Amino acid sequence: MKPFTAVRSESVAALGEVELIRRLGRWLAPVSPPSPRGMGDDCAVLPASRRPQLITVDPLIYGRHFDAGLAPERAGAKLLKRNLSDIAAMGGRPTAAVIALTLDPRVRIDWLRRFHRGLALCARRFGVSIVGGDVAQANGVLAASLTLLGCSTGGRFLERRGARPGDWIYVTGSLGASERSGHHWSFTPRLAEGAWLARRAEVRSMMDVSDGLAKDLWALAPPGTEPALEGAAVPLRRGAGLAEALGEGEDYELVLVVGARSPRAAFERAFKRAFPRTRLSCIGRFERPARIAPGSLRLRDYHGYEHLR
């Protein structure tokens, strides 16, 4: 659905900011609590948390992250799920979100209604309250930025730091052909898997794969090491080649590091019992350059997505 219209009565310009905000509250009603826990004040008032809190933010921009070929409901869900994947990567549980809209006055009211309906359905599915936000005008722009709060599910959350030389590299699911297959909007954030992995002592660090494994994996590498991968072990999504799997991005899978001396077979069996439908693949390990075996796949030969380059 094309989000812009030349018919003023169909556009947000016909509503104005005050009426638009009122309608946003109605469209999000199932997941938007009343003030002061939700929309209506300068800030939402949230209950105190006894556990460490998490916060992340991601945008969704028309012409960059989606186009008119993606249904508005799916775009709304994708905005939230991009953020949910970050919470999953730390082993957390989502709690509340705020959304900032940047709109051209020509944006269709119906497009925006359907976008927020999709967002609301996704938020209800994952237990997220939409507690506030903002609206701003910018000609030629359609963008939404969502800030998501969460908390740890136990006494531990996983960071990107923590891996050591010799540790094993695992990834959930399959990689590559995300745009062509529709995975970039249809994926399910690995929240349950992330929370389970955060409770496992074998797992040293973790992150989600959003810009391509060839870029993201370096953030987990211990100083003085490189990822040494087995190309045949990289799990490919149907129709994807290895270069796509390593560099295309928007996979929203978890990449994690398991200690070199951990009982890997027992860990893999436990994961399979907990998540029989989620694939888990060991794809290599972190090695010092002099110890990398001939024939290993080296990520320096591949490139992920990097903003502003």
Image (spheres, rainbow, N blue to C red):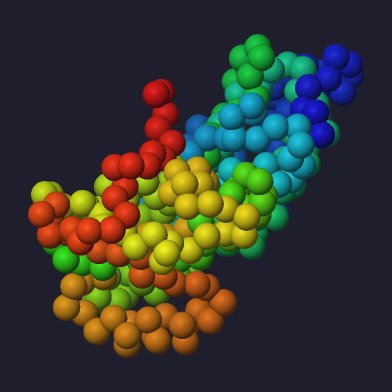
Which sits in the foreground, 19 or 188?
Answer: 188
Horizontal arrangement in the rendering, residue 172 relative to residue 32 (left or right): left
Which sits in the foreground, 137 or 170?
Answer: 170
Q: How many marks?
A: 0
Let me know if residue 284 appears in the view. Answer: yes
- The image position of residue 65, as x and y in percent, is 59, 35
**Res. 156 image quadrant:** bottom left
Q: Quadrant of the N terminus?
A: top right
Q: Quadrant of the C terminus?
A: top left
- The image position of residue 110, as x and y in percent, is 83, 34
Horizontal arrangement in the rendering, residue 145 relative to residue 202 (left or right): right
- Residue visible at 10% across and 54% down in the picture: 290
Horizontal arrangement in the rendering, residue 227 relative to residue 245 (left or right): left
- Residue visible at 24% across and 76% down in the picture: 201
Instruction: Relative to 33, say whether 126 is above or below.
Output: below
Let me know if residue 153 appears in the view. Answer: no
- Residue visible at 74% across and 45% down in the picture: 73
Which sits in the foreground, 244 or 128?
Answer: 244
Horizontal arrangement in the rendering, residue 96 relative to residue 9 (left or right): left
> Most extreme residue toward the top, as rendered?
139
- The image position of residue 147, as x and y in percent, is 48, 41
> Most extreme residue toward the front, as rendered?
294
- Residue visible at 43% across and 36% down in the picture: 305
- The image position of residue 251, as x and y in percent, is 51, 52
